[in-house]
Amino acid sequence: MTTNSKHLTYEDRCCIEADLNNRDSIYKIAKKLNKSHSTILREVAKNKTHIHTLSYGGDTVCKNRHTCHKKYCDYKLDCYEKDQCLKLQSSPYVCNGCKSRNGCRKERYVYYAKEANKTYRNRLIDSRSGFDITEEEIHIIDKVIGPLITDQNQPINHVLINYPDILDFSKTTFYSYIDAGLFKFRNIDLNRKVRYKTRKNSKKRRTKTERIVRINRTYQDFLDYTLENPNCNIVEMDTVEGNKGGKAFLTLLWRKHNFMLIFLIDSLTQECVKKVFKDLQDILSEEEFKQLFEIILTDNGSEFLDTESIEFYHKTGEKVVKLFYCDPYRSDQKGALEKNHEFIRYILPKGSSFNDLTQEDCNLIANHINSLCRESLNNQCPFKSMLFTTNERTLNKIDMYYIEPNDVILNNTLLKK
């Protein structure tokens, strides 16, 4: 009649009640429902309803009522003995189907499908409520994990990856525990639990120069090129502003590895972007530069319109980089870099001035972000992932180093000197 599902349904229980009323055996009911007889027995035993029949004395009739000479039986007396039906001591252990059931004044148990299903549902809800974690485990998490989140601003993913022995549950469960207030750290200590402002819809038109520059460099051109060259290195490029008119960051991110470089620039101008690429070409060998920079995808900012300074190797004049632009107002087309900018804002919130920073500070920020373990990288960090594209000696040339997981800091204490 039914499938071999683990739990009995309400229809199954209705069938059990009807068959018990017809005085069918447990084995016959089990065969009909395609269940084991022990399953049916446990169902009846767990979910049967107790019928409390009262006598004149206030409780179930006394077993000795026929030999007792007391006019009124009182269940509190020493001679009182509850009268139990012998039929309840054998299968099916309920009064369903008994011919004497209506007039019986003995203790009774009846299986009702509706009540049985209600009891089952309540027991199921109770079993899944509460938290499967002990006070000792909460104390350990507060002691070990708490400082990493509150003092060093490490994301949930990072601590889950590096402490599987302590956090032996899923990310969703961890968030549920935090929501419930089980730990000393709260949602306010988690940087990712923020609201994003609605983007402004600017009506500004592109200039003639911008339109010319974008010829053969549109996002569709980018998709066509990567379709023909699926294994090429894609670098996303953008800027991060400090105070208006002050210093800013030029960021470069290798999409395949989530590896990011941060360069301090004096202003959002083409000259500053040109200087960054010239410095990189001076530090790295021509072979290393070509290996790292095959495709660059950036937005339509005016600082990126000098294509020659980005695409050409300045020592030889050879074109070594393919430059493409995202569609206007589509920052999601380089979403990996936009998402990585969040980590910068952990350390330097919006409104922070970059004027007092040095390039060494930028390298330090990048190193801590690049040492952060990511689920998308199979629980590896971007620094180690980047070693599949280049070697550690090349990364050390541009001051990139690995930071141990426990030492990763993502708040403003990182730059305190």
Image (spheres, rainbow, N blue to C red):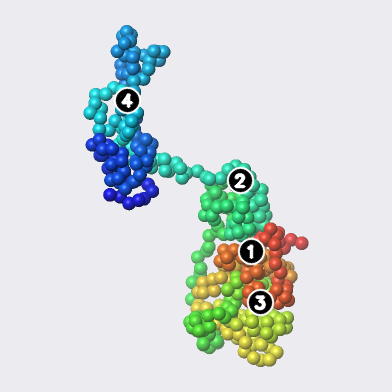
> From what the image shows, is residue 384 above or below residue 189?
below
Q: Position of residue 100 (x, y in %)?
A: 24, 26
Front residue of this view, candidates 40 and 387: 40
Q: Which circle's residue, 1 or 2, is located before the other in the chain?
A: 2
Q: Amino acid at mark 1?
A: Leu
> Does any portion of residue 74 appear in the rendered image?
yes
Please name the amino acid that badge 4 sits on: Leu
The mark lying in front, picked from 1 and 4, is 4
Q: Residues within 10 Å of mark 4 (few under 14, many from 20)?
A: few
Q: Residue at x 63, y 55 (%)?
A: 163
Where does label 2 land, which residue? 137
Sequence-wise first label, 2 or 3 = 2
Identify the residue position indicated by label 4 in the image: 86
Q: Residues within 10 Å of mark 2 (few under 14, many from 20)?
A: few
For image coordinates 52% across by 54% down, the residue present is 172
Residue drawn at x 66%, y 77% is 390
